[in-house]
Amino acid sequence: MSLGGGSGAGRRPDWAALAIAAALAMVAGVIVWSTAGGTSGGGYARIGPAAFPYVIAAGLFLLAIWTAIAAWRGDFPKREPQQLGPLAWIVGGLIAQMLLLTTAGFSIATGILFAATARGLGRGPLWLTVPVGIVLAFVVWLIFARLLQLSLPAGPLERLF
């Protein structure tokens, strides 16, 4: 993403990149608004706990401006049209995970998300990726729940251990 050269001469503005620039600017605005509304600790210090969120907001705002300029000039490379099938698999897997998390538990719900994401990315059949995903998620659950003593939703598989 270069601001020099004008490699996109004659191209129309990249509306998707302009939407991303607007989203970055909104996130920066929310950070500033949220930080300004909070209480300030360290009354005598020049740099308090609110300084870091302002720095992040400034960086996001500069990135939004940079992205908007590059998008308006058409400096981003052309992209292929988005395919909705893979996106539907990934979003569907995420929705399934959120719905199943409290009833089926972390391992099964996350294993289904793993399999749906793999399917969306064109990898492996579901009969293979679902069990592999469940096993990997169960290992993650064991590490977090048993070794680190952090609470993750337990389902029937986790209750066996």
Image (cartoon, rainbow, N blue to C red):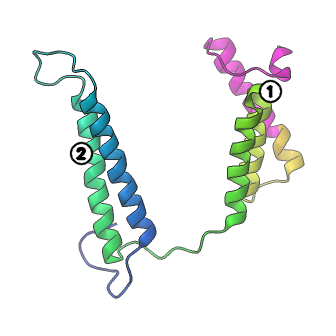
Expressed as whole percent of the image width and height from the top left, the position of residue 51 reads 21, 30
Q: Is residue 13 left or right of 4 when viewed as pictured?
A: right
Residue at 28 percent of width and 34 percent of height: 53
Q: Is residue 36 magenta?
A: no
**Residue placed most toward the observer, 66 or 27:** 27
Q: Secondary structure at mark 2?
A: helix
Tag 2 near tag 1, CB within 8 Å:
no
- The x, y position of residue 88, in whole percent, is 71, 57
Q: Is residue 156 left or right of residue 83?
A: right
Residue position for label 2: 58
Q: In which quadrant of the rendered view does residue 161 lie?
A: top right
Q: Looking at the image, which residue is at 84% across and 22% down?
A: 157
- Of tags 2 and 1, the one toward the viewer is 1
Location of residue 135 with respect to 66 vertically, above or below:
above
Instruction: Name the residue at 42% across, 71% down.
Output: 15
Is the residue 23 above or below the residue 1 in the image? above
The answer for how far apart the CA atoms under marks 2 and 1 are is 42 Å
* Label 1, residues with CA under 10 Å away: few <14, some 14-19, many ≥20: some
- In-front residue for pair 88/37: 37
The residue lying at 13 percent from left, 16 percent from top is 43
| Mark 2 Cα-neighbour bin, 10 Å: few <14, some 14–19, many ≥20 | some
- Give residue 110's position: percent from left, percent from top: 73, 35
Residue position for label 1: 103
Residue 9, horizontal then vertical, whole percent: 32, 85
Label 2 sits on what residue type? Ala
Which label's residue is closer to the chain start, 2 or 1? 2
Q: Residue furthest right?
A: 127
Residue interval drawn in magenta = 132-161
- Choose top left, top right, bottom left or bottom right for residue 82: bottom right
Judged from the image, the secondary structure of the residue bearing numbered disc 1 is helix
